[in-house]
């Protein structure tokens, strides 16, 4: 299992810490669609749960959206139950481009995991750019989480390749905090994605990630949990059973994204 503090981060993304409201699942937001630079990390899909909540309350007050009162409590008119309020808050977050992308989500989890288990801050140890590209190197050192992209995670300087998803591997040896990275996937082969393994017990690999399935429309996306059942131990990862949100394999967009990637690997942090 991941460390207790890492699991706490996961729980807070699945139920953002708004006062008096539970089960506001963090939406997905990828800054690549907006191509904004120099923004606060919370505005570009890299914010922590607390930063997302704080920014939502600030936006509500600043632009008089009447979503939160002066004390930060939800005050949506006409919404009475927790579920109604949680749904309205999620829509407000999505309409205001507040959420987290896959690498931002996983980075916040892994930073806490390695601090607690190895007493190291992986954000300060990641290799981003060679020092000869001094400006980019300095920016990455000053703003590490903003630069911890999927491609950076897939660099051999940062992670070790454990297995190719298309080759045989004894999948029982996968560990919590291992990653499945997907390079050049999606309809145009221009997207990168990754998922984080949180548990591997009794031939079931459980994972979390932040994603946006095309089948879920404008408001259905966000952080998600899934599992890979090792039903064919002698086969590659795509010959196992991938389950997420009630969808299996060819109906599961995470499976399709992994299977369609130019490079799909299992990788492990080196530090």
Image (spheres, grey):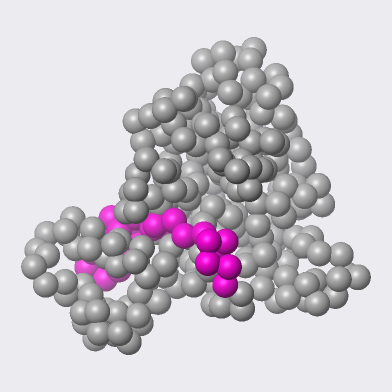
Q: Position of residue 43 (x, y in %)?
A: 49, 72
Residue placed most toward the observer, 171 or 256: 256
Relative height, residue 212 to residue 90 (above, below): above
Residue 168, horizontal then vertical, whole percent: 70, 19
Tell me, yes or no, if residue 261 can be seen here: yes
Which of the two residues, 108 or 156, is positioned nearer the viewer here? 156
Question: For residue 34: magenta?
Answer: yes
The quarter of the displayed image where residue 54 is located: bottom left
State yes or no: residue 20 in magenta: yes
Between residue 261 and residue 107, name the one nearer to us: 261
View extreme (right): residue? 132
Residue 152, how many percent across, how many down? 72, 55
Query: Residue placed at 63% from the left, 48% from the top?
Result: 190
Question: Looking at this view, is 112 or 117 the one in front?
Answer: 112
In the image, residue 204 above or below residue 271: above
Q: How many marks?
A: 0
Task: Please give the name of the residue rendered at 29% of the width and 79% of the height, measured from the top-left corner.
Answer: 60
Name the dominant secondary structure of the magenta segment: loop
Q: Residue at x 70, y 36 (%)?
A: 263
Say whether residue 199 is visible. Answer: no
**Quarter location, residue 24:** bottom left
Region in magenta: 13-36
Image: 130 above or below 250: below
Q: Position of residue 106 (x, y in %)?
A: 56, 53
């Amino acid at each position: 299992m991941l460390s207790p503090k890492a699991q706490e981060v996961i729980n807070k993304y699945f139920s953002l810490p708004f006062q008096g409201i539970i089960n506001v699942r963090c939406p997905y937001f990828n800054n690549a669609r907006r191509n904004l630079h120099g923004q606060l990390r919370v505005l570009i899909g890299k914010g922590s749960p607390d930063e997302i909540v704080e920014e939502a309350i600030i936006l509500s007050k600043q632009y008089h959206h009447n979503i939160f009162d002066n004390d930060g409590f939800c005050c949506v008119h006409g919404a009475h139950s927790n579920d109604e309020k949680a749904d309205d808050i999620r829509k407000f977050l999505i309409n205001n481009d507040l959420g987290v992308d896959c690498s931002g989500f996983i980075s916040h989890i892994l930073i806490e995991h390695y601090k607690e288990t190895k007493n190291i801050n992986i954000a300060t140890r990641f290799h981003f750019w060679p020092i000869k590209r001094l400006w980019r190197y300095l920016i990455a050192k000053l703003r590490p989480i903003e630069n911890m992209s999927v491609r950076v995670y897939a660099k051999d300087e940062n992670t070790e390749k454990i297995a190719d998803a298309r080759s045989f591997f004894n999948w029982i040896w996968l560990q919590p905090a291992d990653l499945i990275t997907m390079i050049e996937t999606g309809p145009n082969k221009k997207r990168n994605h990754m998922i984080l393994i949180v548990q591997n017990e009794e031939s079931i690999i459980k994972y979390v990630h932040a994603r946006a399935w095309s089948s879920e429309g404008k408001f259905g996306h966000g952080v998600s949990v899934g599992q890979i059942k090792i039903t064919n131990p002698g086969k590659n990862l795509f010959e196992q059973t991938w389950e997420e949100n009630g969808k299996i394999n060819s109906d599961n967009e995470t499976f399709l994204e992994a299977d369609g990637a130019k490079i799909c690997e299992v990788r492990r942090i080196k530090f």
